[in-house]
Image (cartoon, helix red, strand yellow):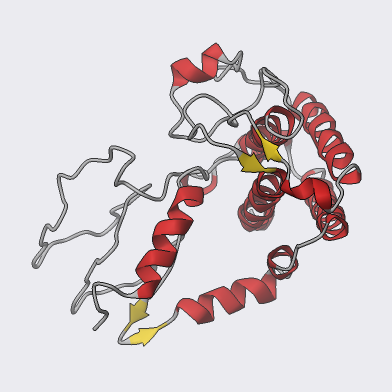
């Protein structure tokens, strides 16, 4: 049994601040999620085909269940299956498949950030090269209801605008109209930023906007210095984010973390599209 004051709970609480601003909030607590099923019991219930998105499943117990063809993604800590904690195994396997995760965790200096961005550029160039062999319609297809490749690129455009141009470069309204905020971000707030959520741009248009934003990041990391990494940025990434000062290193780190994680999702889904 895990004690209620397990130090891992404190680690999780700290990491959730960052996690709730990912593709999903991964946390239903302060985010206003429904508590309809909090502490609910499902006995001899048929949950085949059920889907849980953006849900807080902390403390979930599944006893004598049938888990066949089950897929789980999200923040994992103290995850035990048949009394075996598989958290470290999952993390190690992800590191083996995606060594850029290991490289990112070791980033400390300005040169480290530059090397990390070079890796990110290389990975996305390889992924984009793969898309050239697919029909255009496939790039707008959502695999298992996840973002399409086009939507993923549009989201990373927004991330660069929010966490590089607005925070690090101190631009008040840098948002590209084709950017795609997180799923939790209110439509009205996105529209107020000049973002057109109803836009259906062509792939070439998305690639052009994406290339421009990647060039912005290249300029940012080129100009980084070790002393400058601690400079506090005064602007929040966008209305709705916590209004607090953040060091340059953290802001650039958010962009890179998003690039790495969405690359992982994108190539996972590209493999499905290629197999078809």
Q: Where 119 falls versus 53 (above or below)?
A: below
At x 79%, y 32%, the residue is 213
Looking at the picture, tell me which residue is in the foreground, 46 or 11: 11
At x 24%, y 66%, the residue is 60
The image quadrant that residue 204 belongs to is top right
Looking at the picture, tell me which residue is in the foreground, 72 or 45: 72
Can residue 189 be seen?
yes
Q: Where 207 falls versus 201 (above or below)?
A: below
Can residue 74 be seen?
no
The image quadrant that residue 186 belongs to is top left
Q: Where 117 falls versus 157 (above or below)?
A: below
Question: Can you give x and y, in whole percent of width and height, for residue 120 in the image?
Answer: 79, 53
Q: How many marks?
A: 0
Q: Is residue 256 left or right of residue 237?
A: right
**Residue farthest along the bottom direction in this orientation:** 83
Looking at the picture, tell me which residue is in the foreground, 162 or 133: 162
Question: Can you give x and y, in whole percent of width and height, for residue 149 in the image?
Answer: 66, 41
Q: Is residue 252 left or right of residue 243?
A: right
Question: Can you give x and y, in whole percent of width and height, for residue 181 in the image?
Answer: 55, 31
At x 24%, y 84%, the residue is 1
Q: Where 189 falls versus 241 (above or below)?
A: above
């Amino acid at each position: 049994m895990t004690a209620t004051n397990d130090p891992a709970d404190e680690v999780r609480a700290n990491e959730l601040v960052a996690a709730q601003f990912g593709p999903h909030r991964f946390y239903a607590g302060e985010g206003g999620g429904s508590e309809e099923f909090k502490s609910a019991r499902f006995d001899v219930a048929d949950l085949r085909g059920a889907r849980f998105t953006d849900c807080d499943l902390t403390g979930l117990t599944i006893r004598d269940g049938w888990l066949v063809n089950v897929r789980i993604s999200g923040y994992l800590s103290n995850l035990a299956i048949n009394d075996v904690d598989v958290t470290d195994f999952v993390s190690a396997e992800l590191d083996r498949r995606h060594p850029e995760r290991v490289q990112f965790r070791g980033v400390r200096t300005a040169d480290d950030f530059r090397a990390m961005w070079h890796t990110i550029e290389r990975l996305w160039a390889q992924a984009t090269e793969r898309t050239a062999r697919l029909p255009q319609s496939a790039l707008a297809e959502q695999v298992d209801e996840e973002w399409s490749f086009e939507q993923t690129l549009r989201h990373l455009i927004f991330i660069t605008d929010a966490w590089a141009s607005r925070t690090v470069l101190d631009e008040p309204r840098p948002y590209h109209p084709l950017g795609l905020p997180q799923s939790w971000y209110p439509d009205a707030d996105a529209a107020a930023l000049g973002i057109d959520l109803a836009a259906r741009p062509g792939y070439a248009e998305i690639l052009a906007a994406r290339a421009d934003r990647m060039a912005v990041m290249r300029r940012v990391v080129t100009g980084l210095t070790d002393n400058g990494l601690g400079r506090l940025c005064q602007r929040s990434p966008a209305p709705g984010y916590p209004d607090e000062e953040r060091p340059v290193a953290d802001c650039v780190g958010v962009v890179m973390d998003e690039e790495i994680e969405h690359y992982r999702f994108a190539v996972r889904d590209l493999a499905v599209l290629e197999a078809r």
